[in-house]
Amino acid sequence: MDQSRPAAVIVNNSLENWKVIGAGGYGQVHKARHVVWGFDVAIKLLQCDEGSSLHNEAEMMHRSRSPHVIRILGVYKDCPPNCGPSTQLGLVMEFMEKGTLESLLDTLSLHPPWPHPLACRLAHQIALGMNFLHCLKSPLLHQDLKPNNVLLDNYLDAKLADFGLAKVSHSVSTTSKEFPGKAGGTSSYMPPEALENVSYKPIRAFDIYSYGILLWSIITGQSKPYPDVHAREFSRFCFLIKDRGQRPSLEAVDKVQFEGLGDLVELMKKCWDHEPSKRPPFKECVLVTGRVFEKHQKGIQNVVNQVLLKLNLGSEEGSKTSGVGTPSVSPSSKPPACPKDKVNISADVKTGSLPPTQDVADGLSSKPIDKGAQFVDDNMEQLVQRISLVMPIADGLYQKKMIHYEDYSEITAAQTSMAKMRKLYVALQPGGSVAKSAFYQILLKQQYLLVKELGGVVQK
């Protein structure tokens, strides 16, 4: 989409397959398919009539992009299906497949321990997104930073949502057990100076405090900072936070659990300091979180794969498979034709792929399954970036019944080779090391030189 143009105004004839996926004090969130763009979008409808503010917000974020802030694709203005005859306004945003950080925390609490490489990446990505908002020419305050407003894509990368919407819609979830704050936002994540202060005007320090509490959730894997304080005890909560200086419990935090955790804990304490002027700006937070994530970056892919597998197993239990790696596709099913990607895979000089000799191929095939799977895990980002002919690989895996027909269709429909490779990798997860080993063996035949360059070749 051309960033120089205003955000598009989107109406009903561009949308189909509406489905309610969330609700709160602001209104409802719907998922729908954009019939022209060909992909799903999220539509956040607003109950309040703040058209000019909404358009200004959308324009600012449409022109200023960050990979760690949800993308606004346009402004909705029409009568939503089954919502009455009146015209409503809303934001049309990219749809995030894996939900919110809050739902992830709640899910993983059943599967301890919390994976620290992913925790470090989430802490860093959220800090990067907030730093971006605060460094805009006209700085944008979030005012409602909490796990429920951090969305996750298919690879568990984090993006901020509901930024600045407290000014427009007072975006507070009525389904949450948190207390709605008078300055906009959610009380558990609001700084003490804002609690019960009707005249308080948020500044950057507001968001920094919220990030400190959010960092606690990421470190501990818990989504509720004050589980023992109930909504009816709002005055007691204010007393504890403002007068007693109470903060979420650190009893369960072991600073030596992993390298850099102590640095994150110290940053967290600085961010939730009682004095706003002592809280570090996000440009300093980014330096700390970046150093810590760098220590664990090598292990991020394996951890993401493990978490995705847990999420997929939880959502697909009893639906797609009757056994690991066995797709529920009839023997007569054939993959859809892919003329654009079909090539003679015996030799592709342009991409540097040459078939190995039989001797070398035999030697490679003797490599243990777990080694091949490990190679795939360790080098997936390189493979995603460098393999341009994805469909021949997907064809081979489909024929070996290592990926499902539904996943195969999604790979085929992806518009870029990188997107195809990422979808293919996610599709391999239910099959575990067996599916990854099959993927590796296909790579040996189709992308031999690349495998060799990445250290996957074992000579006899």
Image (cartoon, rainbow, N blue to C red):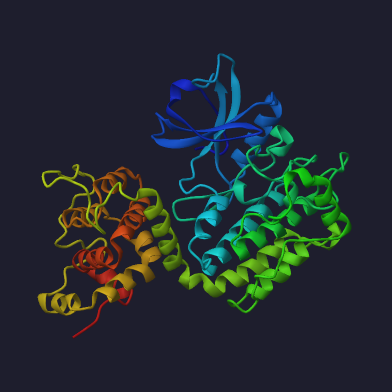
Question: How far across and how far down the image is residue 314, in percent?
Answer: 40, 53
Name the residue located 70 percent from the left edge and 41 percent from the top edge: 164
Q: Is residue 380 left or right of residue 246?
A: left
Q: Is residue 424 above or below residue 197?
A: below
Question: How far across and how far down the image is residue 163, in percent?
Answer: 66, 43
Name the residue located 18 percent from the left edge and 45 percent from the top edge: 335
Which of 424 and 82 lies nearest the eye of the viewer?
82
Q: Is residue 292 left or right of residue 441?
A: right
Question: How far across and how far down the image is residue 64, in percent?
Answer: 62, 44
Q: Is residue 460 above or below residue 199?
A: below
Question: How far across and how far down the image is residue 142, in percent?
Answer: 70, 46
Residue 66 visible: no
Name the residue located 66 percent from the left edge and 37 percent from the top edge: 174
Quadrant housing residue 155: bottom left
Which of 283 and 403 lies nearest the eye of the viewer?
403
Residue that protrudes farthest toward the bottom in the picture: 460
Residue 305 visible: yes
